[in-house]
Image (cartoon, coloured by chain):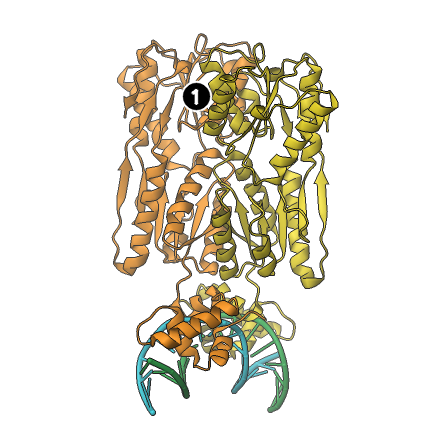
Chain colours: A orange, B yellow, C green, D cyan
Amino acid sequence: MRTSIKDIARIAGVSVSTVSFALNNKPGVSDATRLKIQSVAEKLNYKPSNIARSLVTKKTRSVGLIIPDISEVFYGTLAKIIQDALNEDGYRLILCNSESNPEKEASCLDLLTESGADGIIMVPCSINNAEKILNIMLPTVFLDSFIEGMNVSHVGIDNEKAGYRVTEILIGLGHSRIACIAGPAGFSSSNARIRGYQRALKGSRISANDLYIKYTDWTVEGGFRATKELICLKDTPTAIFVTGDTCAIGVFEALFKSGLHVPGDIAVIGFDDMKFSSFLKVPLTTVRQPMRDMGTEAVLLLLKQIAAGEGAGRKETILDTEIVIRESCGSKNKKNLLV
Amino acid sequence: MRTSIKDIARIAGVSVSTVSFALNNKPGVSDATRLKIQSVAEKLNYKPSNIARSLVTKKTRSVGLIIPDISEVFYGTLAKIIQDALNEDGYRLILCNSESNPEKEASCLDLLTESGADGIIMVPCSINNAEKILNIMLPTVFLDSFIEGMNVSHVGIDNEKAGYRVTEILIGLGHSRIACIAGPAGFSSSNARIRGYQRALKGSRISANDLYIKYTDWTVEGGFRATKELICLKDTPTAIFVTGDTCAIGVFEALFKSGLHVPGDIAVIGFDDMKFSSFLKVPLTTVRQPMRDMGTEAVLLLLKQIAAGEGAGRKETILDTEIVIRESCGSKNKKNLLV
DNA sequence: TTGTATGCGTTATCAA
DNA sequence: TTGATAACGCATACAA
């Protein structure tokens, strides 16, 4: 049996409500009894039950985080930042992996509502669960990706613009056969990057080639497979825009295995700027996302919504990115570009 | 107001206990009423409250995971594996980062007990909280590292042997000035690797040099700093054993910045075999840990303990590792070695 | 300043 | 096969 406030009340010779008041530092308890109660609680090694507390307060001080895959560095880093911000305010983190699968995403949503999460931060992997998200009536913030048209707060970057700028750089370096390896089709962030890529091509009157766009799962293996296919094309691309640095590792692997050199034979630009990106065999040019700001802002927004109850309006935060020029794109211009 | 079994009972015209029985698929309810209750529940979009359920059952079906830092690939990968295994059995994951800080580790422990976790899987970062771990009386499994002498289950690898074999390889390649970049001093896994390293030196009658052992925080930055210091030594080492691949990235950076070549000037062997390890500028020779087995075994052990209550005995599982030979150690022998 | 009583949503015991 | 009712540990409105 764990010790409860009842035990403390009995031993301290007071009522349970007094114990409750004293332990929660509420006014209306004499210093003498408060001290006594505290010492008894200490002695009994009392730990309040959040379960019981939540049942009456309707608040669990926990928030759910739904991401595709915690083992991917990008999401892991985001999770750590969110975790830290949350803990600072005394909130717990319940972790869920959607695996970029709408049905699993739905399960995550169910799990979180049943657990009584006070709010949800999620990277939506599809638009399938829009209705469910509305139905569960929980404060929610979309991170990185979002679902268009929904009245839900959202923090991210201008993916379209970033995709546009990356492609412009490649075009500026003389490339016209530019491929794009994107993430799963359900992510708005990935789709926006593709749109930017297409707009840049159009702007330079380069005819788009559908075969140059590959959808993967943002993993090393995915990048490897997509690149293998690109290499087999009749008009092999001379440049690849990969929308994730982890994925770019696989791109490199496929390229090197085929005896192709980067950037000599094929230029590569990634996305995210992970810790390893500058240490790959060829240092990777990439788009740096302000991950810390993204995470903390998402938490800020969510906690505000939780505090405000129904009354909190939707808010959208779009943060700036920066293109980090390294060797993989073949540019001699080492100056980074703000997007 | 969320809908409760009371609402269902009222609308279906039955008692709450019948609703509870029906919804939990317990025997003793006629098919007719069960169906009726289920349809009402469906219509009201009923989701059970795990909070209330937990208050009476004393089980939350959630387990806490305490790791140093979820943004480190090694722990992120472990977390994902654990999460999957847990979800398969209907358990939730509450994530905690200790940041290799004993005090934060203590906070994590407190947080988890207050949240009512049914059990804990943890990578202990120190021996400071041994007593606390005992006191909270929760089923616990140590993963990767453990605290010696404690009656707590543990799954990991033979770190001492791995450190020994790595050092032996380096010695076999002709090195005698071998440095070791270890993790924080609180991790038993890291310390065992150092012991193995020292034993191998001793076995070959190479005098140990204390200056050759560096403790870091297992990050890129940590590896960078440690290597910088090693390079400045009078007798610069000709080989470095880094006890983590992420850390090895920083080692490479420091080496390259100083104009040193790997493995020509300095041989490097890492630990973990992360996804990026074969894609670094110089493919990294490293010790592969059976991470999937480690994670699933930890979950298996924990759930068994949770099911068994007090009666479950301590169990220790030591899994096999493999040394993956790549270019960074300068060996022409590409055959991997089972440790 | 302190105590009594009630309820949160569920399970479980016992009676009908 | 079903229904009252107590209990879980806590917070809180109200009474003393």
Q: Who is closer to the viewer here, A101 or A211?
A: A101
| Res B263 quadrant in image | top right
- Amino acid of disc 1: Ser
- Residue A275 seen: yes
Callout 1: helix, strand or loop? Answer: helix
Q: Who is closer to the viewer here, A220 or B94?
A: B94
List x then y, in percent, for residue A232. Answer: 52, 14
Judged left or right of residue A189, residue B199 is right
In the rendered image of this protein, does residue B36 appear above or below residue A126? below
Of the 4 image quadrants, the one containing the N terminus of chain A is bottom right
In the rendered image of this protein, does residue B12 appear above or below residue A154? below
Judged left or right of residue A30, residue B143 is right
In the rendered image of this protein, does residue A173 appear above or below residue B112? above
List x then y, in percent, for residue A211. Answer: 45, 20
> Which residue sits at x=47%, y=40%?
A68
| Res A293 quadrant in image | top left
> Which residue sits at x=71%, y=44%?
B317
Q: Who is closer to the viewer here, B120 or A149?
A: B120
List x then y, in percent, for residue C4. Answer: 41, 88
Judged left or right of residue B86, residue B101 is left
Where is mark 1, residue-wise?
A: A278
List x then y, in percent, for residue A57. Answer: 39, 68
| Res B236 quadrant in image | top right
> Which residue sits at x=53%, y=24%?
B248
Q: Chain of mark 1?
A: A
- Residue B289 seen: no
Of the 4 image quadrants, the one containing the C terminus of chain A is top left
